[in-house]
Image (cartoon, helix red, strand yellow):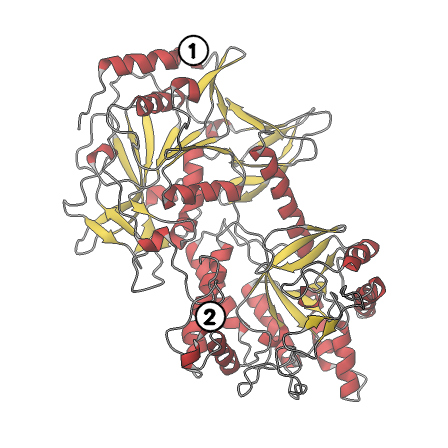
């Protein structure tokens, strides 16, 4: 593999780039325009798909060149750069390649990219590449390691912590969900002992090399020939924890901390049915008496699950000890029913929760949790909608919907609870469509919400993951936690879990084998130990995956899970402890209330539509970032600490501090048509140095690097983890 570019190739590339970029001496007089957009050269592999997913989720604009597509654009100097009003323009602020050179030795496209990166100081990410001298690493065969990385513990180096990976606490654990499948694969190698003239290699994340006292590179920066590459010699997919942990740093590195879009970690838990009693799972019947899943004639539950005053006191103590605020989603009528059933005028649970009411956020869940969709016919299992003589569904009326919400507001007011009346969680998310019985929303729901002033309406993420409009309200999809509403003890939870997730031959329902989004347990869990040993770590791993996904959607469970065995807490504690062990103090998990989540999702959707529709223009010239978007669309951006937003007169603060950067939404100031950010001088990327060297030829790809099936088709964490299936 040759090291020097052929003279003709270098001369040709240099001539093309010279049309756009003056010599280095001219940079100070005419600094180039750098467009805030990433170029992703995609080979169809999981690594580039993962990086594209991160850009999508954060709202960072990118352009994809699909190497497998006929008639794809050819990467030339003209594709990469031009001039705008006499100023040199780089059309992309960063480049993502599937490996260090997907085009082959002597390729004109790689030559053009290398010259472009050198001329404009553009960084390149090698999404998954072979450990080799061409990327500053020794061959892994020379005292390194090649193979599975499942369960390996990576570590951020001092250099990584001081730079773009400083938001991490240090550890980068690799998933190992299935001992029978390879879920990751890579090359652990050390940097070359002697680098090429002028080249340096800086390990940013490493791991111990099996059978050796040395550490091998997982992520490293290779600076050479006026270019800088982020070398990643292992393969991953968008769901894996190791990628989710590193994704932010990869983007910050490639964009030098200045880009559109933002990435934060979110964790909010909503507790439904507060003040109600929840029906209890019956292990003999394998259903829940009092609910619609039991055969007709089963009768009501004689022993429902309801928090006690001691449970309420513990919730307040736990919340304070862990610095974590629950959203209590409440039904005031549950307390009135309890008092009636017990022939008393006071409810000790209410007394305790009202004493601690400022420890929580409160959300309206209707007065008595009625089903607000079609009128249910529960004389059959599964239930169906009652119909008119013409066969049309009978709908719960607008008046009934309105009363269910207003009565709960009145109850809250009489007990001194502070509500945001824009927020609503209906019982079972009813009123919204539910398949297969009710394929459309209750038409009375939208009009009722309008009269009530509701603008944020909870929905079930497992049914409808996308936000949508319902009258004046935007839905807020919630993640259902696999801690069941009808379980107050660990044994009840385990028994029901076994019923759902074991096959017929093992005594289960068999639904796991036929639902299409779940898998069966290998064997039923031990009722005495299964909850703590299996369900808790699995559910915590799934929930933590949501937290790491830049996803503000809340999780929800039920008050029954805070009662009796208090089975919610081990899951929550494991999530919080896991998070604290992974991230630095400057990167806390963010907890938004329902109305704010609705707004965040709405802004993201508008921003995504704008940049994907080609309606956003964004660029940096020197220390000034300018972003233009359609009227009414707020701009999402990330910038270095100290960045200010320029106004007609003076400047104002931009964004909020997170993960060592500033990020957030912005809109043009008074009499302005665009958002202008002024960067602190110390954070402005340096202009490229004069290229008084010979470009080394980028390496040719080494065939198709190995990708285990567990990376190509992500291995679920367990039977409740449907997101990857």
In primary-sequence order, the first of circles 1 and 2 is 1
Specify few, some or many for label 1: CA neighbours under 10 Å numbering under 14, 14-19, or 20 or more.
Answer: few
**Residue lying furthest front:** 390
Q: Quadrant of residue 535?
A: bottom left
Q: Give the residue at mark 2.
A: 512
In depth, the one of 194 and 560 nearer the eye is 560
Q: Give the residue at mark 1.
A: 26
Label 1: element kind: helix
Q: Quadrant of residue 606?
A: top right
203 sits to left or right of 713 = left
Give the distance between the C-alpha atoms of the residues marked 1 and 2, in whole angstroms: 66 Å
**Residue lying furthest left:** 142
Identify which residue is drawn at 15% across, 47% down.
143
The image quadrant where one finds the C terminus is bottom left
Residue 60 lies, in percent from the top left, at 51, 37
Residue 612 lies, in percent from the top left, at 56, 34
Q: Does the image show residue 402?
A: yes
Label 2: element kind: helix
In depth, the one of 463 and 140 nearer the eye is 463
Identify which residue is drawn at 24% across, 27% down.
105
Placement of 199 over or under 410, stated as above or below: above
Q: Quadrant of residue 328?
A: bottom right
Residue 228 lies, in percent from the top left, at 33, 30
Residue 269 lies, in percent from the top left, at 59, 63
Viewer-nearest of discs 1 and 2: 2
Q: Does the image show residue 23?
A: no
459 sits to left or right of 176 = right
The image quadrant where one finds the N terminus is top left
Identify which residue is drawn at 44% across, 69% down.
513
The numbered dot on residue 658 is: none
């Amino acid at each position: 593999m040759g090291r020097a570019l052929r003279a003709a190739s270098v001369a040709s590339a240099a001539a093309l780039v010279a049309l756009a970029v003056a010599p280095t001496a001219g940079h100070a007089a005419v600094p180039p325009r750098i467009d805030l957009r990433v170029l992703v050269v995609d080979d169809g592999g999981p690594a580039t798909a993962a990086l594209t997913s991160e850009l999508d989720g954060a709202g960072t604009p990118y352009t994809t060149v699909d190497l497998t597509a006929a008639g794809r654009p050819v990467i030339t100097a003209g594709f990469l750069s031009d001039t705008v009003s006499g100023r040199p323009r780089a059309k992309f602020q960063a480049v993502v390649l599937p490996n260090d050179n997907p085009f082959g030795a002597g390729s004109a496209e790689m030559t053009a990219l290398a010259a472009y990166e050198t001329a404009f100081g553009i960084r390149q990410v090698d999404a998954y590449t072979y450990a080799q001298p061409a990327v500053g690493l020794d061959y892994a065969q020379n005292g390194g390691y090649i193979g599975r990385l499942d369960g390996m513990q990576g570590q951020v180096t001092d250099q990584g912590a001081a730079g773009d990976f400083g938001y991490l606490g240090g550890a980068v654990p690799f998933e190992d969900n299935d001992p029978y499948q390879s879920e990751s694969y890579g090359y652990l190698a050390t940097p070359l002992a002697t680098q090429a003239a002028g080249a340096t290699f800086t390990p940013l994340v490493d791991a111990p090399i099996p059978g050796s006292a040395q550490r091998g590179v997982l992520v490293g920066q290779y600076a050479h020939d006026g270019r800088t590459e982020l070398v990643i010699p292992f393969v991953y997919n968008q769901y894996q924890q190791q990628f989710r942990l590193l994704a932010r740093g990869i983007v910050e590195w490639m964009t030098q901390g200045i880009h559109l879009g933002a990435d934060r970690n979110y964790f909010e838990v909503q507790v439904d049915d507060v003040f109600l009693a929840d029906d209890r799972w019956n292990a003999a019947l394998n259903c829940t008496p009092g609910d619609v899943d039991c055969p007709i004639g089963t009768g009501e539950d004689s022993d429902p699950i309801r928090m006690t005053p001691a449970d309420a006191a513990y919730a307040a103590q736990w919340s304070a000890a862990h610095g974590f605020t629950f959203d209590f989603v409440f039904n005031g009528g549950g307390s009135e029913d309890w008092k009636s059933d017990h022939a008393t005028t006071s409810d000790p649970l209410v007394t305790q929760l009202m004493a601690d009411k400022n420890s929580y956020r409160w959300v309206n869940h209707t007065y008595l949790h009625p089903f607000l969709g079609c009128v249910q016919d529960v004389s059959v299992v599964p239930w169906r909608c009652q119909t008119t003589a013409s066969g049309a569904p009978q709908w719960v009326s607008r008046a009934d919907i309105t009363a269910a919400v207003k009565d709960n507001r009145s109850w809250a007011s009489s007990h001194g609870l502070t509500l945001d009346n824009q927020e609503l969680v209906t019982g079972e998310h009813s009123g919204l469509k539910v398949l297969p019985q009710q394929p459309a929303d209750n038409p009375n729901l939208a009009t009722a919400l309008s009269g009530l002033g509701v603008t944020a309406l909870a929905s079930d993420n497992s049914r409808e993951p996308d936000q949508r409009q319902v009258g004046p309200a935007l839905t807020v999809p919630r993640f259902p936690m696999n801690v069941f509403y009808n379980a107050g003890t660990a044994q009840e939870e385990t028994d029901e879990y076994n019923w759902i997730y074991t096959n017929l031959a093992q005594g289960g329902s068999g639904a796991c084998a036929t639902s299409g989004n779940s898998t069966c347990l290998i064997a039923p869990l031990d009722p005495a130990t299964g909850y703590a040993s299996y369900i808790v770590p699995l559910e915590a791993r799934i929930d933590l995956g949501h937290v790491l996904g830049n996803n503000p959607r809340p999780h929800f469970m039920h008050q029954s899970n805070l009662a009796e065995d208090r089975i919610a807490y081990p899951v929550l504690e494991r999530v919080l402890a896991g998070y604290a062990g992974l991230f630095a103090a400057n990167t806390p998990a963010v907890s938004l209330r329902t109305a704010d989540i609705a707004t965040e999702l709405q802004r993201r959707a508008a921003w995504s539509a704008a940049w994907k529709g080609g309606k956003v223009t964004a660029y940096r010239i020197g220390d000034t970032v300018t972003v233009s978007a359609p009227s009414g669309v707020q701009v999402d951006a990330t910038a270095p600490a100290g960045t200010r937003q320029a106004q007609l007169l003076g400047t104002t603060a931009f964004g909020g501090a997170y993960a060592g950067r500033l990020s957030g939404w912005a809109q043009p100031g008074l009499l302005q048509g665009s958002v202008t950010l002024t960067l602190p001088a110390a954070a402005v990327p340096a202009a490229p140095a004069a290229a008084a060297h010979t470009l080394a030829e980028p390496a040719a790809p080494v065939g198709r690097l190995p990708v285990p099936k567990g990376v190509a088709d992500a291995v679920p964490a367990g039977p409740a983890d449907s997101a990857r299936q």
